[in-house]
Image: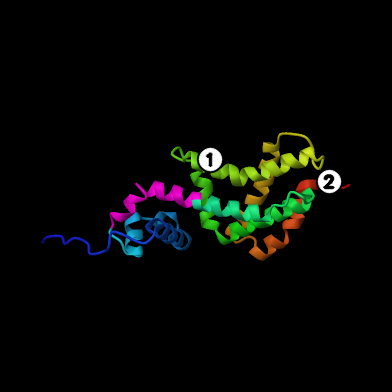
Amino acid sequence: MVDMPESRPYHHGDLRAALLAAAERTLRDKGVGSLSLRELAREVGVSHAAPGRHFKDKQALLNALALAGYERLSRALGAAEDPALPLEPRLTALARAYLGFAIDNAELLELMYARKHEPDASEQMATAVERTVGSLERVLADAQKRGEIIDGDPEELNLVTGAALHGMAGFIAAGWLTPQAALAGVEGLVHHLLNGLKPR
């Protein structure tokens, strides 16, 4: 029996965007293990070879998904950032934006953090991480200049802040904390981060 060529069209209006949207749906519904360029091609209605024009393999697709996630997170943080605010409300707004993104994009956020450590992660990925995760470090460095927090390495202080936020995001993803409770607790979390737990 002779294999007939696929009748699916090779071209698509914006194939790259369609593939990324389909990939994100698959990631959200079924997990990263279910992602396949061939399956995505079938879903968006193009030949199985068509995705190769945009992604050489699954790893390239994962990198592109992570980059798109960092771009959206960057926009969310940028919209929440207000340098004119004192540190506590400024950091609270950023923390709320981060957790809002984490609630809406739990699987994507996990992929973003996984991809940034991959050996083949691009310079674009490093820049994207700096724009998002690094933005909190810049807020802390600015607060040091304004005398709002202690001296020290801003990167180390950012590690503590990031660990608290990402830990809360992990609790939400695991079902240990509802999104509503997490968002309601952001103000208290930031207050404890900035003021510590010792009695005053």
- x%, y% of residue 19? 39, 58
Give the vertical position of 85 relative to 143 (above or below): below
Residue drawn at the location 35% of the way across and 63% of the way down: 44
Left or right of 52: which side holds 147?
right
Q: Quadrant of residue 140?
A: top right
Assess whether mark 1 and mark 2 are in contact (beta carbons under 8 angstroms): no
Which residue sits furthest top? Answer: 152
Amino acid type of the residue tagged 1 in the rendering: Ala
Q: Label 1 belongs to which residue?
A: 126
Name the one closer to the observer, 167 or 3. 3
- Is residue 50 in the magenta section? yes
- Residue at mark 2 to residue at mark 1: CA–CA distance: 37 Å
- Local crowd at mark 1 within 10 Å, few (<14), some, or many (≥20)? few
Colour scheme shown? rainbow
Amino acid type of the residue tagged 2 in the rendering: Lys
Residue 167 visible? The answer is no
Which residue sits furthest left? Answer: 1
Residue drawn at the location 34% of the way across and 46% of the way down: 56
Which residue sits furthest front? Answer: 13
Residue 94 visible? The answer is yes
- Over which residues does the magenta segment extend? 48-67
Left or right of 71: which side holds 30?
left
Q: Label 2 belongs to which residue?
A: 198
- Is residue 70 in the magenta section? no
- x%, y% of residue 20? 43, 57
